[in-house]
Amino acid sequence: MVNNFLKNNLAILFGNVFFKIGGYIYKFLMVYLLNNYAYGILTIISPFQNILQTLAAGGLPPTISKYVSEYNATNQKENSYKLILVSIKIAILLGITFLLLIIFFIKPLLVKIYNNNSLLLPLQIIGLIVPFSAIVGVFRGIFQGTYEMTHILTSRAIEQITMILSAIVLIILGFSVVGAIFGSVIGFFSSLISVIIILHKYFLDIFQGMLKLKMDFKEEIKIAYKIISFSIPVILTAISEIGIYSMTTTIMPLFITISEIGYFGIAEPIARLPLMISNSLATTILPVTSEMFASKNTNILKKYMFNALRYNLIIMVPICLFIMIFSKEVLLVMFFTKPFYSKGANVLTILTLGMFFYSIFAITSSMIQGAGKPKSSMYLLIGGFIQILLLSFIFIPYFGVNGGAISTTLTTATMTLISLIYLNKHISLKFNMIHYLKILFAGIIIAIFLLILPKNLIGFYIGLLFLFPIYLITLMIIKGFTADDLNILMKIENKLPFKLTIIKKMIIKGTEVNFNEYRK
């Protein structure tokens, strides 16, 4: 189980790195292929696309993941098949329903609110994405619940590659931002085809099991009620999460120009870059938490929780500090032919701090959901949604795009603090905090090093070169490693064509106590 957890974490981590890089390639290309106004429209449209996709998916992916993992752990395969079949039917119904709502209700309403007809056609196009993404979500939930994370990565890779290539071709042909959005439609359609093929090829037992099922309407309604009961908190949680990410960009058009919003759109994905670590950990910790709770194996669960939070912190601290301190240089390097985008440096600094807090919350929220308390996670995010909504109306009129970043950071900090207090109170983690304090101390050393460097491209490259060596040496000196770090490094090393001798020696020298001390 431990090896499976590690394997899936590594798969999701490397996958998230790949997709983040792909996402930045996409953003990078959109910046260069679109003018600032068109990119501003894309920034405004994106959160509505995400919210509508979430509503259409009905919270099914995490729900399916939870119940499939539980049924597999207790050998209830028929119940698993029934749940999957009913979920597919719900996804199809929701996809069609929201497609019609977008075209006939949501689109004209938003155009009227923003008083901008240039949003009309892009809003229509995002409606076409919804049916495909809803069904794809069901299949990815199956893959997650059975710990087959590589299949999720395959479908996402197909989606992203076809989306990027389609968007490029359509923009070159003269369709501008409309082409960029329609590329997403083509991407999700391709992903749908891929997940159907994967299910039929690798999960033939599930495919055949669903075909053999005999359920009356009353039983389907009963299962649908069970799915919806769990899904509603998940949906509200997901929408609130998207709102925390994107609420500011939906409010900005009321106070600032679309061109200005483009600066926020440039900084936001870079600030969210470190989240690939927490997202990979959160994706894997949900079914593990659910299965460990179902089997009453709390000791192993606490070990997973300890490692998830600790490894997130180890990687997030140096990356976030570097982006915050060299925010202007990061923008200049990434968008070297458009240096005026460095005006978003302050936004990037503030948002990166906010995403640091959010990375911790992403993991604690998954732990809370996996422990069978999705409503608690929902309440935290709804509270965050309300907070960022109020703060956005306070700060954006006075501070513009920086006000949006401030609202995001204050909200994520509040949510993270509350979630940690809740998790410690209701699940009794009782971690040894010295491990976390050592990581934060190493972060302080790194911050001092970065701050004394010149704030130009020379300082940027020096900082980038020595960032992790100084960080790892500091952790070694203060004995900031654990025995588990060495075990995990050796497992990674076995899959590589070269040895990690230097890092291995640093971890051995920097390990003071056995991992079991976290229980004390």
Image (cartoon, helix red, strand yellow):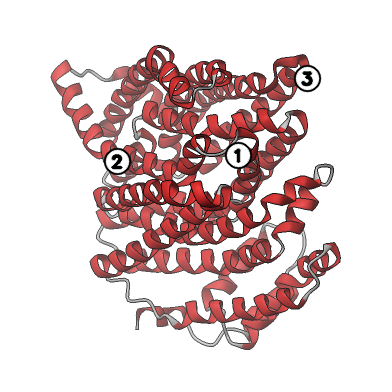
Q: Secondary structure at mark 1?
A: helix
**Quarter of the image that includes the C terminus:** bottom left
- Name the residue located 64 percent from the left edge and 57 percent from the top edge: 346
Foreground residue among 257 and 437: 257
Mark 1, residues whose alpha carbon is within 10 Å: few (<14), some, or many (≥20)? Answer: many
Residue that carries the numbered disc 3 in the rendered image: 172
Say what amino acid the circle numbered 1 marks.
Ile
Residue that carries the numbered disc 2 in the rendered image: 67
Indicate the position of residue 224 as horizontal and vertical percent values.
Answer: 22, 27
- Name the residue located 42 percent from the left edge and 80 percent from the top edge: 433
Residue that carries the numbered disc 1 in the rendered image: 261
Q: CA distance from mark 2 to mark 3?
A: 45 Å
Q: Specify whether residue 146 is in view.
A: no
Of tags 2 and 3, the one toward the viewer is 3
- Name the residue located 31 percent from the left edge and 51 percent from the top edge: 383
Indicate the position of residue 449 as horizontal and vertical percent values.
Answer: 72, 78
